[in-house]
């Protein structure tokens, strides 16, 4: 039996569990299930209940809840030995102000400040002077009264005004660049006005996809948007992991309709791999397609899709 909590993926038993913990009936159903399908925005109580009740759960959010926030993501990269910008973690403004030596870049080198929370670059700031750093620390201290605490200080990586977004949907990766139109904003995000480019620098894109595959293989991540940058001070530029977005925009992969088609196909492949069949077509899954051969690549609209093992 397949139990689904996803409104767009149909199982043998279907539930909606928004804004509340799972009921005893839902937990009993998960205990009897061969597989459980969860929504992308799955809350932690539902995920923990599903993992305790059934050993086959999609998506795999162990990394999401085991290493929460931007601080947790840096700790994950460190634990897995994966390349990322030099970073210092501070749980509070008071920790930053402790007298022991702390990492601060050389004067004249910019620094990136990131709150532990936030998305689309809303709580990410480029600091160009010690004065700007002090102002941002004071700002962070003021937020702590509301319970929002913790931040990162990160080395600024010269990246040519572009970042690579790698969307992971099951066993498939899709990579595209987000490029800044000018130097008005250092963030290469769509919310900050970046443009989508799925064709430039194919060799670098492949290197970024390889690093993303490695992260997925080591962590189990199978539904996320990964952000990478390339350090242009190195020849060739080397990919570095920036962060993981478990809720991510879909414009770069063709919109929500295409996302749900890819998701439905990924879930069907996952069910087949574990010896199950969905039995029913997903609401938005469309017709069945044969899975790509191992190592094959398929291009749709200029995007490169590369199957990868994520378990």
Image (cartoon, helix red, strand yellow):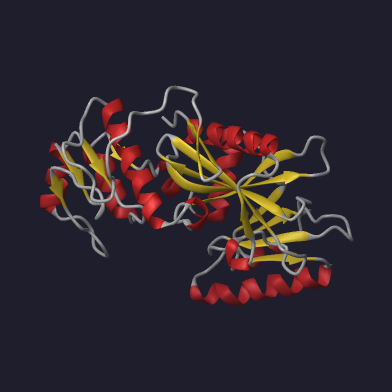
Whether residue 48 sits left or right of residue 300 in the image: it is left
> Which residue corresponds to the image point at 60% horizontal and 47% vertical from the top-left?
198
Q: Is residue 36 above or below residue 134?
A: above
Q: Position of residue 297 (x, y in %)?
A: 51, 30
- The residue most toward the top is 294
Position of the N terminus by quadrant? top left
- The residue most toward the front is 301
Q: Position of residue 28 (x, y in %)?
A: 12, 45
> Where on the picture, by quarter, is residue 278?
top left
> Which residue corresponds to the image point at 61% horizontal and 39% vertical from the top-left?
78
Report the front residue among 259 and 71.
259
Whether residue 190 sits left or right of residue 225 in the image: it is right
Q: Tell me if I can see residue 82 in this picture.
A: no
Report the front residue among 62 and 234.
234
Whether residue 17 sits left or right of residue 162 in the image: it is left
Q: Position of residue 75 (x, y in %)?
A: 57, 44
> Where on the picture, by quarter, is residue 222?
top left
Report the front residue among 38 and 205.
205
Report the front residue among 228 and 124.
228
Q: Is residue 172 above or below residue 9?
A: above
Position of the C terminus by quadrant? top left
């Amino acid at each position: 039996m397949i139990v689904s909590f996803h409104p767009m993926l149909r199982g043998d038993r279907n539930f909606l569990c928004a804004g509340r913990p799972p009921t005893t009936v839902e937990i009993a159903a998960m205990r009897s299930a061969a597989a459980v399908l969860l929504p992308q925005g799955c809350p932690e109580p539902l995920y923990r209940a599903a993992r305790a009740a059934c050993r086959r759960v999609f998506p795999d959010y162990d990394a999401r809840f085991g290493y929460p926030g931007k601080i947790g993501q840096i700790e994950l990269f460190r634990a897995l030995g994966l390349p990322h910008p030099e970073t210092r973690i501070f749980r509070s403004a008071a920790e930053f102000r402790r007298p022991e030596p702390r990492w601060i870049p050389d004067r004249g080198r910019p620094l990136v400040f990131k709150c532990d929370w936030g998305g689309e670059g809303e709580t990410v700031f480029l600091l160009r002077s010690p004065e700007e750093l002090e102002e941002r620390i004071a700002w962070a201290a003021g937020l702590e009264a509301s319970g929002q605490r913790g931040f990162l200080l990160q080395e600024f990586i010269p990246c040519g005004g572009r970042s690579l977004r790698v969307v992971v949907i099951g066993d498939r990766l899709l990579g595209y660049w987000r490029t800044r139109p000018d130097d008005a904003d250092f963030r290469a995000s769509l919310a900050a006005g970046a443009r989508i480019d799925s064709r430039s620098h194919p060799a670098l894109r492949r290197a970024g996809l390889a690093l993303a595959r490695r992260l997925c293989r080591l962590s189990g991540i199978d539904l996320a948007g990964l952000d990478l940058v390339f350090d242009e001070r190195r020849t060739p530029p080397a990919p570095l992991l920036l962060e993981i977005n478990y809720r991510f925009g879909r414009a770069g992969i063709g919109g929500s309709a295409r996302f749900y088609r890819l998701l439905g196909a990924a879930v069907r492949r996952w069910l087949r791999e574990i010896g199950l069949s969905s039995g029913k077509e997903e609401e938005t899954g469309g017709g069945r397609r044969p899975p790509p051969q191992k190592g094959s690549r398929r291009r749709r609209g200029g995007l490169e899709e590369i199957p990868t093992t994520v378990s």
